[in-house]
Amino acid sequence: MTDCPFCRIVARQSPADVVYEDDAVLAFKDIYPKAPVHLLIVPKRHIASLLDASEADVDTLGRCVLAARRLAETTGYAGKGFRLSVNTGPEGGQVVYHVHFHFTAGRRSRTDV
Ligand code: AMP
Ligand code: ZN
């Protein structure tokens, strides 16, 4: 069994409130939301951080960004807008080492999510 909490969610070995899924991407609600809408968009394939991303990950990471656009539409924030951020490395505030895009919406953007 993997030690990575987001791989465990992808494998359905841990619970999550899944809001979107396709063959490359899973999105679920952040367990400690910091905005009225706070979702995490993750590649199904484990990539520890953006610092580990390579050419082979370009399609998967692009699919995460397109999932954000889709989630903006399904959550009703395509008009108002949203924020997409990827904390990377210790000084980037990354806690979980499986690349994840924070999708936040519902209030003015802040820089510390
Ligand atoms: P980061 O600091 O960018 O690594 O963010 C990790 C995020 O993952 C935080 O916002 C946590 O609240 C969230 N998180 C951690 N574990 C879970 C989980 N099991 N389900 C949903 N969100 C989680
Ligand atoms: Zn993982």
Image: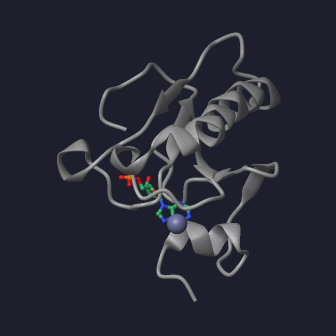
Q: Quadrant of the C terminus?
A: top left
The answer to whether residue 68 shows anywhere in this view is yes
Counting from the top left corner in percent of width and height, residue 96 is at 40, 61
Quadrant housing residue 78: top right
Which scheme is used to colour this image of the protein? one colour
Residue appearing at x 56%, y 44% in the figure: 56
Q: Is residue 25 above or below residue 18?
A: above
Counting from the top left corner in percent of width and height, residue 64 is at 64, 38
Residue farthest left in this picture:
91
Residue farthest front in this picture:
55
Closer to us: 19 or 2: 2
Residue appearing at x 50%, y 24% in the figure: 107
Closer to us: 67 or 19: 67
Closer to us: 53 or 16: 53
Q: Is residue 4 above or below residue 21?
A: below
Q: Quadrant of the N terminus?
A: bottom right
